[in-house]
Amino acid sequence: MELQKPSESNLPLYVAALERELDEGHEPFHYSLEIIEGAKKDPSALIATFDDPVGGRLITVDAGMQRAALPSFTRWLYDGEICGSIQFRWKPGTVELPPYCLGHIGYQIFPWKRGQGLATKQLELMLGLTRNIELPYVELTTTLANVASQKVIRKNGGVFIKEFERAAEYGGGMYNLFRIDQS
Ligand SMILES: CC(C)(COP(=O)(O)OP(=O)(O)OC[C@H]1O[C@@H](n2cnc3c(N)ncnc32)[C@H](O)[C@@H]1OP(=O)(O)O)[C@@H](O)C(=O)NCCC(=O)NCCS
């Protein structure tokens, strides 16, 4: 079990998993189609977006809005297949995040791989990488209903901070905020 850095050699495995997710009728993430298209058109440009220490390119955030991307990097959990993906994004020099960004770390596990402790492992492995970035803590958010994700965070040392309402312009909704200490 390891986190893999996205590259042109493992991209086909990731795209095949995204396509399987769509074929099986699971709700796609807003980025799934963009990635499938990007992999066909320009794989090396797509791969560059998965390891972006500078940021600044326009990305679609929730509610269809476009914003400048924060610096970020993505890793894929691999156990012989790609199990899921996890992304870390941050604003250099501060622990603060812009209001459209729901936490420093976002992740998903493909539906056929869920319920085996893989999201918990994926976050544990990512925290081993984020500790190299100087931030006193990382913030993670979940919807109030996402009990599985709340457990993943708590099992990795996450401390519940508060419930908050997301600004209406970014789609609204109630969320839980957690912090994981990095000091
Ligand atoms: C949330 C998600 C990442 C969990 O992935 P996973 O690999 O199934 O999680 P794990 O197997 O590590 O499970 C973590 C805990 O949640 C529990 N859990 C898993 N699915 C659950 C569910 N549907 N309802 C309640 N608890 C659940 C597990 O039993 C485990 O708890 P335990 O250790 O007490 O048994 C996955 O469901 C997913 O990708 N969902 C869609 C994207 C998403 O919600 N991402 C997170 C955004 S904040």
Image: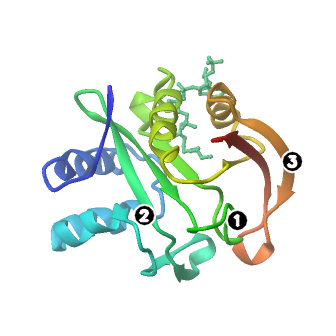
- Marks 2 and 1, how far apart at CA: 24 Å
Q: Quadrant of residue 32?
A: bottom left
- Marks 3 and 1, how far apart at CA: 16 Å
- Which of label 2 and label 3 is nearer to you? 3
Q: Which residue is mark 1?
A: 96
At label 2, counting other C-alpha atoms closer than 10 Å, the crowd grade (few under 14, some 14-19, many 20 or more) is few
Viewer-nearest residue: 60 or 48:
48
At label 3, counting other C-alpha atoms closer than 10 Å, the crowd grade (few under 14, some 14-19, many 20 or more) is few
Element class at badge 3: strand
Q: Which residue is mark 3?
A: 162
On screen, 3 above or below 105?
Answer: above
| Residue 31: image tag | 2
Residue 7 in picture, x, y percent from top left: 20, 54
On screen, 32 above or below 62?
Answer: above
**Residue beneath the point at 68% across and 40% down:** 180
**Residue beneath the point at 42% across and 63% down:** 31
Give the mark, 2 or 3, whose residue is nearer the N terminus: 2
Q: Is residue 175 left or right of residue 14?
A: right
Give the residue type that dot 2 points to.
Tyr
Element class at badge 2: loop
